[in-house]
Image (cartoon, helix red, strand yellow):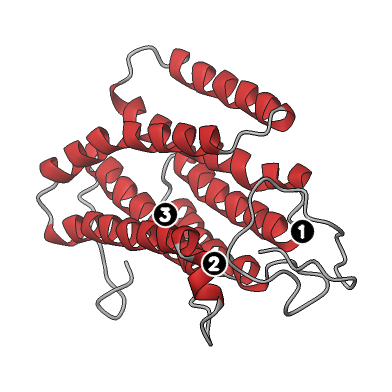
């Protein structure tokens, strides 16, 4: 939301999008306080996933996937802390790169031309980053991101129906649950911002989106690691800490 005060460290807002949180309400150095700190769980979850991937000697693509989750969360923190257009790219560009990584991880086991797919995805990501830095996409960016996400759905569903282990299927269900609730929080925050602003307590729908998507990415990555371990004949198991955390 607007309400830029004289104490704002980063100056006037130049980003193409603002969220339903009063700017600089908690600190003169952080434009959107809750939208910034809500990325911390995302970083911690990605770090746990990275440790698991390295400790269990998964292929490098999974380590890169967890690191990309961390980079995305850090970029989101920078964007929400400043609300500057040039730093908005640190959030939106990694979002697209991350989806390209998911496409690679999901489809690469059955891709016969090994060098073609990563080369194409790398060039696609590079061209997007350059174009997005020069052109202020708003609706176009959201539509583009949704299309990339939808490309992952058929393959995720295929992995789900071919997985017989109940604990692994639960991972996939948690993935669907978290992304559904997160999307609802995102939509409600956008659609009813003016009404929410008058409430005594702002539920911070976009901050909830960050937290839930952090868990969503962790569940997705862990499920994909399980599926890949099965492909490699490792006879994997999913262990749940406190019956919830895999």
Q: Quadrant of residue 198?
A: bottom right
Task: Pick whichever, 77 or 158, lies toward us.
Answer: 77
Quarter of the rendering occupied by the N terminus: bottom right
Q: Quadrant of residue 29?
A: bottom right
Image position, residue 169 (x, y; %): 17, 55
**Is there any visible trace of residue 95 in the rendered image?**
yes
74 w.r.t. 118: above or below: below
Q: How many marks?
A: 3
The reply to whether dot 3 and dot 1 touch (C-beta < 8 Å) is: no
Task: Pick whichever, 136 or 82, lies toward us.
Answer: 136
The reply to whether dot 1 and dot 2 touch (C-beta < 8 Å) is: no
150 w.r.t. 34: above or below: above
The reply to whether dot 3 and dot 2 touch (C-beta < 8 Å) is: no
Which residue is labeled 2 in the image? 44
SS label for mark 1: helix
Q: Which residue is painted at 53% across and 79% down in the image?
A: 202
Which residue is labeled 1 in the image? 82
In the picture, measured across the screen, residue 211 lies left or right of residue 149, that is right
In the picture, measured across the screen, residue 230 lies left or right of residue 54, that is left
Q: Residues within 10 Å of mark 2 (few under 14, many from 20)?
A: some
Quarter of the rendering occupied by the C terminus: bottom left
Q: Which residue is painted at 61% across and 73% down in the image?
A: 34
| CA distance separating discs 3 and 2 | 12 Å
| CA distance separating discs 3 and 1 | 25 Å
SS label for mark 2: helix
Q: Which residue is painted at 62% across and 50% down in the image?
A: 71
Which residue is labeled 3 in the image? 217
Q: Quadrant of residue 131?
A: top right
Image position, residue 186 (x, y; %): 44, 59
Which of discs 3 and 2 lies nearer the camera? The answer is: 3
Q: Residues within 10 Å of mark 1 (few under 14, many from 20)?
A: many
Q: Which residue is painted at 61% across and 26% down in the image?
A: 128
């Amino acid at each position: 939301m607007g309400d830029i005060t004289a104490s704002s460290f980063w100056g006037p807002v130049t980003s193409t999008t603002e969220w339903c949180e009063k700017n600089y309400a908690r600190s003169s150095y952080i434009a959107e306080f809750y939208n910034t700190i809500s990325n911390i769980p995302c970083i911690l979850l990605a770090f746990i996933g990275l440790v698991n991937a390295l400790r269990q000697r998964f292929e490098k693509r999974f380590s890169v996937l967890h690191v990309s989750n961390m980079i995305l969360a850090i970029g989101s923190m920078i964007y929400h802390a400043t609300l500057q257009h040039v730093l908005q790219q640190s959030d939106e560009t990694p979002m697209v790169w991350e989806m390209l990584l998911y496409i690679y991880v999901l489809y690469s086991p059955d891709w016969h031309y090994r060098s073609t797919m990563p080369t194409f995805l790398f060039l696609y990501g590079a061209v997007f980053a350059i174009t997005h830095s020069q052109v202020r996409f708003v609706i176009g960016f959201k539509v583009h991101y949704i299309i990339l996400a939808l490309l992952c759905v058929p393959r995720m569903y295929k992995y789900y129906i071919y997985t017989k282990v109940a604990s692994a299927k639960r991972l996939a269900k948690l993935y669907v649950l978290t992304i559904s609730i997160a999307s609802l929080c995102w939509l409600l925050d956008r659609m009813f911002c003016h009404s929410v602003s008058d409430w005594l307590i702002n539920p911070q729908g976009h901050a909830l989106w960050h937290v839930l998507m952090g868990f969503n990415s962790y569940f997705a990555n862990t499920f994909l690691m399980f599926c890949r371990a099965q492909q490699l004949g490792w006879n994997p198991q999913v262990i749940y800490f406190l019956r919830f955390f895999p």
